[in-house]
Image: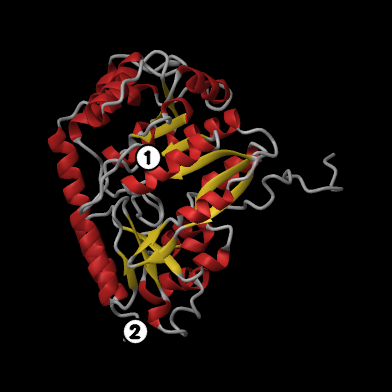
């Protein structure tokens, strides 16, 4: 018989309940609302890549356990992609590891590299799995907050430097940044690299939106800066780039020592996953540059449709330089409609008010008050869906 003398859930995870994504997606289904909350496309990626997965299934490739590090074809394709895009040379056999999406890569890297009591600095607001994975590793998360400045969310480098202590083990850097859409500049990345070298810190970089940068923004891998190769675990993913988020194919690149460490943890998580899809992603990564350019242009057009519609509806819009999310400030809608700037209350009411679902950014903050008035909308949907959503939102104040 189970004892009730203490809570069943261990104290490291006690603060984490059902994710906001599950709650809001369920609310979307219940109310028949347009779901602009969770970040998944409503159309599939390239037909030839889907057919590559079917071909792998029919040919019997990946229907049984694939190799622990990932199938050789995919590891080779990842290395070739890094070389072609960024001039980074990786050994497919020793410096590339395939994971069950980027989420597992993050978990495995933190479990492998963080000791109980180590401090991990993350840019706040952050993807919600960061906090849970740091907790599972026994680490202490130290948020450094991105704050609104001239229409975007910016990093205060002095605040970042001040956050580093003798207990700091690792920096967890996400660029392009979810949920704010910020893309760190070359100058900001250089300063982060100098800090990491000076204080002898490890770095995990979450770069899953690397192909979704807009306007004048440029994605520059942190590992390309002096002194960063030996201390950086870089994480990528196929889901966001090829619109097959359900396939859960991610990867880690780094030195043999770092990749071996991450693999030591990863092998006791899923061990392996996504067998046939690995072969398909290998083909996807070899698509011509025209695919990546067209994909980015399509998402840019969708960003502009949603951003313009949100602005017309009365939101303050922070136009993202990357990812496929738009962050808004709800306070311009007025105290009554915005629930006095309470993003949680606003998002829970929005399906009934307008038939649209969004995500309150406060869930991505340790300092909930910092994120209270901000709400995130996803634009990785068909243009017609975005137009219908903005039409519904335009009636909020009528």
Residue at coordinates 52% horizontally, 66% vertically from top-left? Answer: 370
Q: Disc 2 vs disc 1: Cβ atoms closer than 8 Å? A: no
- What residue did someone put label 1 on? 207
**Quadrant including the N terminus:** top right
Q: Position of residue 348 (x, y in %)?
A: 49, 69
105 left or right, relative to 328: right
Badge 1: residue crowd in 10 Å (few <14, some 14–19, many ≥20): many
Residue at coordinates 44% horizontally, 67% vertically from top-left? Answer: 374
Residue at coordinates 19% horizontally, 34% vertically from top-left? Answer: 47
**Quadrant including the C terminus:** bottom left
Residue 391: tell me if it is visible. yes
On the image, which quarter does residue 201 sit in?
top right
Q: In what element is the residue under mark 2?
A: loop
In front: mark 2 or mark 1? 1
Q: In what element is the residue under mark 1?
A: loop
Q: Residue furthest left?
A: 290
Q: Which mark is residue 379?
A: none
- What residue did someone put label 2 on? 397
Q: Position of residue 281 (x, y in %)?
A: 29, 27
Q: CA distance from mark 2 to mark 1?
A: 38 Å
168 left or right, relative to 194: right
Q: Position of residue 204 (x, y in %)?
A: 48, 36
Count of marks placed on residues:
2
**Which tag, 2 or 1, sits closer to the chain's start?**
1
Q: Nearer the viewer, residue 293 or 222?
A: 222
């Amino acid at each position: 018989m189970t004892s009730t003398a203490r809570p069943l859930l261990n104290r490291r995870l006690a603060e984490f309940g059902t994710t906001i994504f599950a709650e809001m997606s369920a609310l979307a289904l219940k109310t028949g609302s347009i779901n602009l909350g969770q970040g998944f496309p409503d159309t599939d990626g390239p037909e030839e890549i889907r057919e590559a997965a079917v071909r792998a299934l029919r040919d019997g490739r990946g229907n049984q356990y694939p190799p622990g590090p990932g199938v050789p074809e995919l590891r080779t394709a990842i290395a070739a992609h890094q070389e072609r895009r960024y001039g980074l040379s990786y050994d497919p056999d020793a410096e590339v590891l395939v994971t069950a999406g980027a989420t597992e890569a993050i978990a495995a890297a933190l479990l492998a590299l963080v000791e109980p009591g180590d401090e991990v600095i993350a840019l706040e607001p952050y993807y919600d799995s960061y906090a849970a994975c740091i907790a599972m590793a026994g680490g202490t998360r130290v948020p450094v907050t991105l704050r609104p400045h001239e229409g975007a969310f910016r990093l205060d480098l002095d605040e970042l430097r001040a956050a580093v202590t003798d207990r700091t083990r690792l920096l967890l850097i996400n660029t392009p940044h979810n949920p704010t859409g910020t893309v760190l500049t070359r100058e900001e990345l250089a300063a982060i690299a100098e800090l990491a070298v000076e204080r002898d810190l490890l770095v995990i970089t979450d770069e899953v939106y690397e192909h979704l940068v807009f306007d004048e923004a440029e994605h520059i891998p942190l590992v390309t800066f002096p002194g960063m190769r030996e201390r950086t675990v870089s994480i990528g993913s196929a889901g966001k780039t090829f619109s097959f988020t359900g396939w859960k194919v991610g990867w880690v690149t780094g030195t043999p020592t770092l990749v071996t460490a991450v693999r030591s943890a990863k092998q006791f998580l899923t061990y392996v996953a996504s067998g046939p899809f690995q072969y398909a992603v290998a083909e996807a990564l070899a698509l011509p540059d025209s695919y990546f350019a067209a994909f980015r242009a399509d998402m840019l057009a969708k960003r502009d449709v949603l951003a313009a519609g949100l602005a017309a509806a009365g939101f303050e819009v922070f136009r993202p330089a990357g990812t496929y999310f738009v962050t808004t400030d709800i306070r311009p809608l007025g105290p009554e409609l915005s629930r006095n700037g309470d993003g949680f209350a606003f998002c829970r009411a929005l399906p009934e008010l307008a038939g649209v679902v969004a995500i309150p950014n406060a869930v991505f903050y340790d300092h909930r008050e910092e994120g209270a008035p901000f709400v995130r909308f996803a634009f990785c949907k068909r243009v017609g869906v975005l137009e219908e959503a903005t039409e519904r939102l335009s009636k909020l104040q009528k």
